[in-house]
Amino acid sequence: MNITMEDIPINLDWTRLDILAVVCEHVLDKEKEAETAMHQAERQEPFNQQILLMKEKKLKDQGKARIISRRREEEKYRIVGKKRNFKRTKSETGEILPMPQIVKNRINQLEKDVKEVKLIIEKEIYKTDASEPHNRLSIPTTQILEKFLTDEEEEYLCMYSNDNRRNLKKVRVIDPSLDIDELELRRWEMNMSASYVLNGKWTKMRIRNKIKKGDRIQIWAVRMDDDELIIVIVKLSPDEEEEDDDEVTIQEANIEEQKDSNCINNLAH
C-alpha cells in the first residue's frame, strides 16, 4: 500500500513517533475498509446468484406462456374458421381416407416399431407450395387435425438459435413415390396465425413426384418406438379428391377404382 503526504496531513509540531502512529492508524483503516468490502461482496454473491436463477425461471415461464398463448390463438382461429364456413376437407367431416397399404409396407421396411400414426392435415397444394422460389410446403396450425409434436419439440421450434433464426428439426420424409429424403421442419409466425413448413429439399421432392398447384395431399406423422418423427406425404388421386365430378360418369369412376385396386394389390404382392 503506497501512502503519500496527500493521504495524511502532517503537523509540523509532531514528533517522528506521532507521525508513525498516524501512519499505522491510516494503514489499519484502509485494511479494514478492504476487508469490509470483501465480506460484502461475499454476502452479495449468493444474492446475485439467486437473482440470476429467478431471471432464468422468469424467461422459461414466459416461453411457456407464449406457447400456451399461441395454442389458444390457434384454437380461436380454428373455431372462427369453422363459423365462417371455410372450405372443409373430407378429414374434417370425418371421412378420412386411410393411409395406403403400400405406404404402411414402406414404413415397415424401416425395421422399427411404430408407436403412433396421426393424420396432420389434408390440404390442397397452394400456389406458394408449388413455387420454386418459396421452396416450402406449408402446414397452417389452424388446419392441423391432431397434435403431432411433443411439448418439447414445440417449445424448441418456437425458440431462436444463435443466428437469430428459429430452430429447425430435421425429419425424414416418405414422399408419394415412397422415396425417403430429409427435410427441415420449421415454425413460421405470422400476424394472425402460424404455420409449420417443410423446406430444404421440398422443391426437389415436389418436382420428382409431379406435385402441382391444385393437387390434394395428406400429410401424416409417424412416431417410431425410438421417438423419431417421420413425415409421410400421400398424393390423393383425382377421384379421391372430388366427391362430385360432373365430367366423370359412374361407369368411368368404377373402372378407375378397379384399376387402382389392381395396382395396389400388385404392389402389395
Image (spheres, grey):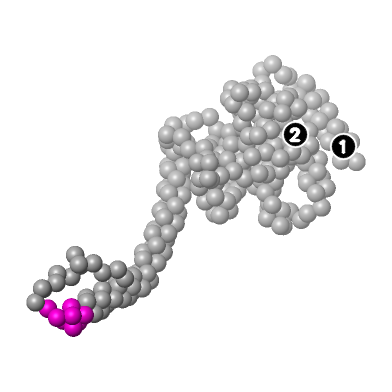
Q: Which mark is residue 178?
A: none
Q: Amino acid at mark 1?
A: Leu
In the displayed structure image, the side of residue 178 where residue 170 appears, left or right: left
| 206 versus 8 height, above or below | above
User: Label 2's element?
Assistant: loop
Q: Which residue is mark 2?
A: 176
- Distance from the alpha carbon under mark 1 to that under mark 2: 14 Å
Q: What residue do we see at 53% from left, 29% from top?
A: 87
Q: Which residue is mark 1?
A: 267
Front residue of 49 and 41: 41
Overall secondary structure of the magenta stretch? helix
Q: What residue do we see at 82% from left, 52% from top?
A: 111
- Residue 265 coordinates in the image, percent (x, y): 86, 37
Front residue of 239 and 109: 109
User: Label 1's element?
Assistant: helix
**For the view shown, which residue lies furthest in the top direction?**
247
Total numbered badges shown on the rendered structure: 2
Task: Give, as a single range, the part of the protein colored magenta.
Answer: 14-22
